[in-house]
Image (cartoon, grey):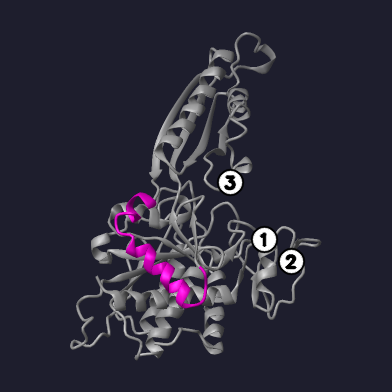
């Protein structure tokens, strides 16, 4: 079959979908214990179920946890040699947006035929996307660029991925001559708070191989994530009236501040890149009597991750010597592990993705993610799931933006992947 390319009408529908989805507030909540963590994530789920049914996915459903599942059945004729040999392939994206930045009342700015240069953000006087801070803007001259207005995030993470998958489903419906095996669609909740697969039933999903569309630059294919733990440091102090506190008060705020200040400066997110590990204190809450510090521990190997956890414990021990009346406890909670450990067991899932990109004339960029995706946990749950680009930039930021053409290429890659799997089978 010829190279799969979305036409201008298909790109227009892709843009319309994306703009429709980003206007639905789906911000998750790190402090919530409900599932999904915010009920408003189901608002988008209901929209997606209805749209999937309109696109011919008769079994589209939202389950009690807010996940959306649907099937595009195989259309390979029974007399075709590929019949029965092509495995079910999953396409996945997450519906929630980052909890740290508002996603309410998103007002996207659409710039057609972007000519280059800085882009003013109309919602904040003097704010702009600068080429100095966003060198990828030089790569998308002539493209349609979608930005925020500067007051909210955009939601390309990961509504770009959702729009791309929905566009791929629509494309298959409109091109019945395109032969493919069974395809399972999955849209998850709460990925941004690390709980995207908490209730994911891999048996119900029914795919051994899947791809998340949740990455950034065009051509990026990510087959490694960090190994991830969270260290919770509980600091107990003693609160007394400050007017009579001499030799009595132990200020937990000062103790916690000392711990944060003494973290190794060479192993922080702001001082590391590529495959370097880090410790990241991301919330600190409390008062004089008690403070809780939550710290992300990230490294690409478990040995390096343990080293960082030991570094944290060493800092705590030194601070304890300076504040002998403080009570400090460190509890480490496992989050996820490097999906590369599992993907190496069956390299085809990565190799086919690389081939799909090359068929589109895009040289794939194999990368390790300085973060994590649902694919990391799913790979350890039995669904090998590398991550494909979705086109978004400046995730988790009010400066978030995306190129429509990069989004279109992601949808084209997903479709081409199905073609590769049909040709090669199992």
The residue identified by callout 1 is 399
Q: Residue at x 54, y 73 (%)?
A: 407
Left or right relative to 251: residue 350: left
Q: Which residues are magenta?
A: 340-363
Dot label at residue 273 = 3
Can the viewer see residue 186 in this picture? no
The residue identified by callout 2 is 121
Above or below, 276 relative to 209: above
Tell me the quadrant of the picture where the N terminus can be found.
bottom left
Above or below, 420 relative to 2: above
Task: Tell me whether circle 2 and circle 1 mark residues in contact (CB < 8 Å).
Answer: yes
Task: Give the quadrant of residue 12.
Answer: bottom right
- Circle 2 packing at 10 Å, graded few (<14), some (14-19), many (20+), is many
User: Which residue occupies the foreground of this view, 340 or 97?
Assistant: 340
Using the numbered discs, state the Cα–Cα distance from disc 1 to disc 3 in whole angstroms.
21 Å
Q: Secondary structure at mark 2?
A: loop
Q: Residue at x 35, y 90 (%)?
A: 176
- Spot occupied by residue 264 in the image (x, y as percentages of width and height): 59, 30
- Spot occupied by residue 143 in the image (x, y as percentages of width and height): 65, 78
| Majority secondary structure in the magenta region | helix
């Amino acid at each position: 079959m010829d190279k799969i390319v979305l036409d201008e009408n298909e790109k227009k529908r892709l843009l319309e979908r994306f703009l429709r989805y980003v206007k639905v507030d789906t911000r998750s909540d790190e402090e919530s214990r409900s599932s999904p963590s915010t009920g408003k994530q189901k608002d988008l789920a209901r929209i997606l179920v209805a749209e999937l049914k309109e696109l011919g996915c008769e079994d589209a459903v939202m389950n009690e946890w807010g996940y959306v599942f649907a099937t595009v059945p195989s259309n390979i004729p029974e007399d075709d040699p590929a019949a029965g040999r092509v495995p079910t392939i999953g396409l996945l994206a997450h519906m929630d947006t980052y909890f740290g930045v508002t996603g309410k009342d998103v007002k996207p700015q659409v710039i057609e035929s972007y000519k280059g240069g800085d882009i003013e953000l109309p919602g904040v006087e003097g704010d702009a996307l600068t080429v100095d801070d966003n060198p990828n803007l030089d790569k998308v001259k002539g493209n349609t660029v979608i930005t925020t207005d500067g007051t909210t995030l955009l939601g390309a993470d990961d509504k770009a991925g959702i729009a791309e998958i929905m566009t791929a489903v629509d494309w298959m419906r409109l091109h019945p001559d395109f032969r493919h095996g069974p395809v399972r669609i999955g849209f998850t909740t709460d990925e941004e708070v690390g709980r995207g697969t908490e209730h994911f039933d891999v048996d119900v999903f029914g795919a051994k191989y899947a791809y998340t569309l949740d990455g950034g630059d065009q051509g990026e294919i990510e087959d490694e994530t960090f190994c991830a733990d969270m260290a919770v440091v509980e600091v107990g102090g003693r609160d007394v009236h400050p007017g009579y506190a001499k030799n009595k008060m132990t200020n937990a705020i000062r103790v916690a501040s000392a711990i944060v200040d003494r973290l190794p400066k060479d192993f922080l997110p702001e001082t590391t890149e590529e495959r370097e590990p880090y410790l990241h204190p991301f919330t600190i809450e409390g008062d004089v009597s008690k403070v809780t510090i939550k710290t992300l521990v990230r490294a690409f190997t478990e040995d390096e991750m343990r080293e960082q956890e030991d570094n944290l414990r060493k800092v705590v021990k030194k601070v304890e010597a300076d504040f002998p009346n403080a009570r400090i406890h460190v509890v480490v909670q496992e989050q996820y592990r490097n999906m590369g450990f599992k993907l190496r067991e069956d390299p085809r899932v990565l190799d086919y993705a690389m081939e799909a990109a090359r068929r589109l004339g895009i040289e794939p960029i194999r990368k390790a993610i300085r973060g994590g995706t649902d694919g990391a946990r799913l790979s350890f749950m039995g669904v090998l799931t590398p991550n494909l680009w979705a086109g978004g930039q400046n995730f988790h930021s009010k400066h978030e933006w995306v190129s429509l053409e990069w989004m279109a290429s992601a949808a084209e890659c997903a479709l081409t992947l199905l073609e590769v799997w049909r040709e090669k089978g199992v």
